[in-house]
């Protein structure tokens, strides 16, 4: 319980400090800007994905890597879906922080920070997954490369 009381006093100080409020308002503006740019990026990825899939159905072009355009379209679409979640968390963080600071509502500020936590958690898990894939590829690929080299 002692830690909870300390958090409450820090929270009260946080919303009372005008310099922190100024920084958080600026962060919310930049976060909203980056989120909007992110949404535009998601839309571009989705449009390119759809175009690649449609072109793949119209033609049967195979790329030098042996994959069709449709395969790349599906990959782009998956990336757009994956990119949606951190952008959504960033946008919600920015909106809630600004709303909470302007109305002096600690519940909105808390919701904003909850979305920031979700953004970091999602990014952290995604980083672990990607690093694990890299490690797996290294473990599988290195022996193959060594066999080919000999």
Image: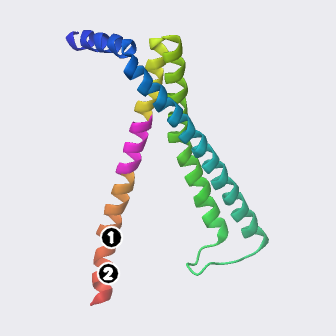
Assess whether residue 48 is covered by the magenta stretch.
Answer: no
Q: Place residue 60 in its image quadrant.
A: bottom right
**Image spot of residue 6 (x, y percent):** 24, 12
Assess whether residue 126 is covered by the magenta stretch.
Answer: yes
Q: Is residue 68 left or right of residue 90?
A: right
Write the start and end of the magenta stretch as one range. 119-128
Residue farthest left in this picture: 2
Seen at 49% across and 23% down, the residue is 97
Q: Main secondary structure of the magenta part?
A: helix
Q: What number is the disc on residue 140? A: 1
> Helix, strand or loop at disc 1?
helix
Give the quarter of the figure containing the N terminus.
Answer: top left
Residue position marked by numbered label 2 in the rendering: 145
**Image spot of residue 69 (x, y percent):** 66, 69
Give the quarter of the figure containing the C terminus.
Answer: bottom left
**Image spot of residue 21 (x, y percent):** 42, 20
């Amino acid at each position: 319980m002692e830690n909870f009381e300390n958090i409450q006093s820090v929270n009260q100080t946080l919303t009372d400090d005008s310099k922190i409020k100024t920084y958080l308002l600026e962060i919310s503006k930049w976060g909203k800007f980056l989120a909007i740019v992110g949404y535009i990026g998601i839309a571009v990825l989705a449009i390119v994905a759809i175009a690649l899939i449609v072109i793949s159905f119209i033609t049967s072009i195979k790329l030098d890597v042996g994959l069709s355009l449709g395969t790349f379209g599906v990959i782009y679409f998956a990336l757009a879906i994956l990119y949606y979640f951190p952008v959504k968390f960033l946008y919600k963080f920015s909106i809630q922080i600004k709303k909470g600071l302007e109305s002096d509502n600690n519940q909105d500020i808390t919701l904003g920070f909850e979305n920031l936590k979700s953004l970091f958690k999602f990014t952290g898990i995604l980083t672990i997954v990607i690093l694990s894939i890299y490690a797996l590829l290294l473990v599988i690929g290195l022996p193959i490369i060594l066999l080919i080299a000999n």
